[in-house]
Each structure stands twice: as structure tokens, then as C-alpha cells.
Image: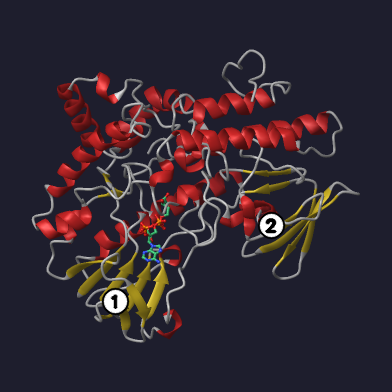
Amino acid sequence: MPLYQFSDPEIWQGWTFTEKYPDGREIQAYFQYVDKKFDISRDVLFNSRVVSAHWDDSTDRWNLTTEDGEVFRGQFLSLCTGIGSKYYIPEFKGLSTFKGEMYHTARWPETHDYKGKRVGVIGTGATGVQVIQEIAPVVAHLTVFQRTPNMTLPMRQRKLDPDEEDKLKKELYAVSFGRRHQTFTGLHFDINPKLMFDATPEERTLFFEEHWEKGGFHFWMGSYADLLLNPKANDEAYGFWRKKVRERIPDPELQEKLAPIQPPHPFGVRRPSLEQSYYEVYSQPNVQLVDVNKTAIEEITPKGLKTSDGVEHELDVLILATGFDMVTGGITSIDIRGQDGISIKEKWADGVKSYLGVASATYPNMFWIYGPQSPSSFSNGPSTIELTSDWIIQCIKHMKENNISSIVPTEEAQHAYSELVDQLGAAALWSEAKTSWYMGKNIKGKKAQMLQFSGGIPAWFIILISSVSLLPPPFPRPFPAGRVSL
Ligand code: NA7
């Protein structure tokens, strides 16, 4: 905070977060506040799962059906399904035989007492890291099943002082929000334009230290310009990261499991999770780390989990922190059919294609926000969301004012944009991670491809607004002259 929120002053002037990284309850309270302010619930049908959306070319309308059989018709379809709405459970043998309690982190129980329980966690991504550091101090025993060590970053959580925030609101909030479309990630800081080895070793060390101290994504998205492009530069950052992490782990065996000499993949090509006490908990006597590359998960049994060394890890609770069918899963779970009657799931089986990361050829009047081929999680979410929303609103206004009843990207425009997304993805080291949701590689059978626009918000913003440069400007920012050629 403060940038991971709506930029409307009516919202932020009346709300102050209590922590730099607010917890789930506070975020929920914030959403309730926003809802009340704009009376959003009035327009929402809760607890209804959309199962299909079919375009009717004769009437220029979408027909939506819910699980309960209700049918809705509408001219426009906006998919706000997010990038992490379809959670993923690998096909572990015997999973349904487990007699204890089992949760996926996406279905975290609101209240639960882990005190005195034997708990197993599979997965060490963002949710695994959070769960592990929170429950380790209270459980009787915790077994973590790790496949790839997470290259985490220090969160540097802190309480926010309301008086200081009030002052910042007057002086800096508006400026910071105004800058969100000007930085690579849509945050208030930017990538250093300098190349890593153009800096002297002393400069580099000071730079790394400073960014490490700042915490959050500074060490990653505030690093030198070639961090994710040049393997040698990447090694340099990894070396610093490894040293910092190892200092917190007394046991050499654990050091090697959590921060190995040889990195499993380049630093930062998978999303680094933010942590607070993650490494300290592994030194607790009640915490055990199992490397599933050495001793694989063989099966889940009624009593726990059996690994390939013959050990049965007895558990009262099994937590699956195994991730999501990220970026596309929310959209492909709905039977969406456009002009040619082909479902989007079938269309994307061979790889996602889109125009601007907002729309898709043959699916008229359909837009998505914070989804495939947009900067989505390579950016500060609200930055991408607000830019996309502005674009969609202006597009619909333009159509209304000009009596246009439907609009659809051409295959050529879609092809050109999707090629650009692929080329940008191939230009960096992203594909060197064996399993990475950025590339769809965490899901069996999913086509491996860069799923997001990785060229940064400013480049995407120019492409986005150039595509609608005929529309009246909604943006309080300069339009580029002419169109950007794809
Ligand atoms: P992530 O970050 O995708 O993490 C999933 C974890 O589950 C990851 O450590 C995986 O190992 C592990 N996993 C998945 N399948 C298996 C199997 N079969 N065996 C062992 N381990 C497995 O999901 P999260 O929910 O934590 O976070 C998702 C995003 O939400 C996050 O990036 C933020 O943007 C918010 P791997 O590392 O692939 O070897």
C-alpha cells in the first residue's frame, strides 16, 4: 500500500490501511467500504456460477446461462474472472482416501485451529510460504513437501501511521497514482535503466543492499535492466540472494535445500513470494522439510502421505498449496462460444491468442480485464485493471455514440499482437523455469507459452491507447502522435 488500491480519490481519501501489506480481513473490509460507497452490490447477482456464454450473431447479443439454469442476455460480456480463480490439485494417487482434514489454500477455512496438529503442506509458492510461516509456531509438527525452493524476497511488513498517511494523502498520493502507467510494473518505483555490469562491483553491492532493505519487489522489479535478460547478470543477483538467505539458516543441509549453490532456475523468472519469518521456521524442531525431488510423493494414504523412501508421514491436516490454472483457467472453465461456434477452450488449446490482452477474434463485444496477454501479474494489479477498464468504457461509449452494435478484433490484428507477446516472452529468461505458471508450465497438458504481456505497462499502455486513438481521450495524459505499428 498505498498503490495496490483504486486510484479514485473518493475512495482513498476516506480509507486508510493499517499495514503496508494488509491482511485478508482488512482487504475484505476495504471491499465492503468500496461497495457501500458506490452501491456496487445493487448490480451483482451473488453465488451464481456462469456455465456458458454463447454469442448470437443474428441479434448481436450474448446469452449467458448459470448453473441454476437462469438465462441472461446482454450486448457486452466483460470477463472479470481474474488470473487465479481456478485452483489446481495435481493427480496424487490415493488423494480421496485421506481421512484427515484437507484444504487447498484457495479454499482456506475462515477459522481453524491448527494448535497441536500434525500438518503437511505440499507446495512452496506464494500461498505455501504464507501458510508455512504462520502455522509453524502453533502446530505440533509440520512437514513441508518442496519441489522447487522459492526465491522469496523480504516483505518488510510495517504498521502505517494514520497521521503520516493523512499527510501523504495530501502531498503524494495523487502524484503516485498519476505515475502508475509510467513505470514498468505500474508501481511507484521503476527498473534501473543501467546494465548490471556497467556498475562497479561496489556500486552493485550497495544497490543490491539498498533494494533488499526496501523489501517487497524492489530487488526484483527495481533491479538493473538486464536482470531477466542476461544470465550472468542474473547469477550475480542470485548470488546475493543466496547469501542473504543462507545467513538465516544455520544448518548447511537446510541451506542447500532452501537456497542451493546451483539455482534451479534463474532468479526472478518465477514470481518471488514475500516472506517474513519463512527461513527461521525451518530451524524449529517441529518442522521438517522434505525434498520431493529426492523422495517423491508416492501416494496419499488414509493416515497421511507416503514418500518413495518408504516413509509414511502421518498427518491430521493436509494443505494443498499447489496453485492454480493461472491466467486462462477462469475463462476456459466457461463454455464461451463466439461467431463460429467454437469454444474458447478449444481455440486456446494450442495457445492463447488475443488482441491487446483485452479481446479475442470471433468473440464480439467480449472483453476481459486483468487476463491473458495483458500485463496482469507483471504489473501492479489495479494499474492494469484501471487502464483496461478505461479502454473498455471508452470503446463501449464510442460504439453507442456511433450506433455500432458489435465490434470484434480482426485475425490479423490479433495475430500481430499475440506475436509481440510471444517475442517479448522469448526475449527474456522466463522459459528457463521447469514449472512456472507464467508460462502455463505448472499444469499438465497446458501449452507452454508466455501468458502475459511482459514488456511493461508503459509499452502496453501506448499500444492500448494507440488502438483507440480515434476515441475521445478519457486519459489525463498525453496521447502519442499517430498509431503505433504492430
Ligand atoms: P504457485 O506459486 O503456483 O505454487 C504452487 C506450488 O505447488 C509450487 O511450489 C509447486 O512446485 C507445488 N506443486 C505443484 N504440483 C506439485 C506436485 N505434483 N508435487 C509437489 N509440489 C507441487 O501457487 P500459489 O497458490 O502458492 O500462488 C499462486 C499465485 O497467487 C502467486 O504467484 C501470486 O501471484 C498469487 P514447483 O515450485 O512448481 O516445483
Residue 270 appears in the picture as rendered: no
Determine the residue positioned at 45% across, 68% down. Answer: 90
Q: Is residue 185 left or right of residue 415?
A: left
Indicate which disc, 2 or 1, sits on the residue closer to the N terminus. Answer: 1
Q: Badge 2 is on which residue?
A: 346
Label 2 and label 1: CA atoms lie apart by 37 Å
Residue 14: horizontal and vertical position, in percent?
45, 38
The secondary element bearing badge 2 is classed as helix
Nearest the camera: 185 or 67? Answer: 185
Q: Quadrant of the C terminus?
A: top right
Residue 291: horizontal and vertical position, in percent?
25, 65
Determine the residue positioned at 53% across, 26% down. Answer: 459
Q: Marks 2 and 1: which is nearer the front?
A: 1
Q: Quadrant of residue 432?
A: top left
Q: Categorize mark 1 by other alpha carbons within 10 Å: few (<14), some (14-19), many (20+).
A: some
Residue at the extreme top: 481
Q: Is residue 436 above or below residue 132?
A: above
Q: Is residue 318 left or right of residue 335?
A: left
Residue 431 appears in the picture as rendered: yes
The label shown at residue 195 is: none
Residue 343: horizontal and vertical position, in percent?
73, 57
Q: Categorize mark 2 by other alpha carbons within 10 Å: few (<14), some (14-19), many (20+).
A: few
Q: Badge 1 is on which residue?
A: 308
Determine the residue positioned at 21% across, 41% down. Answer: 241
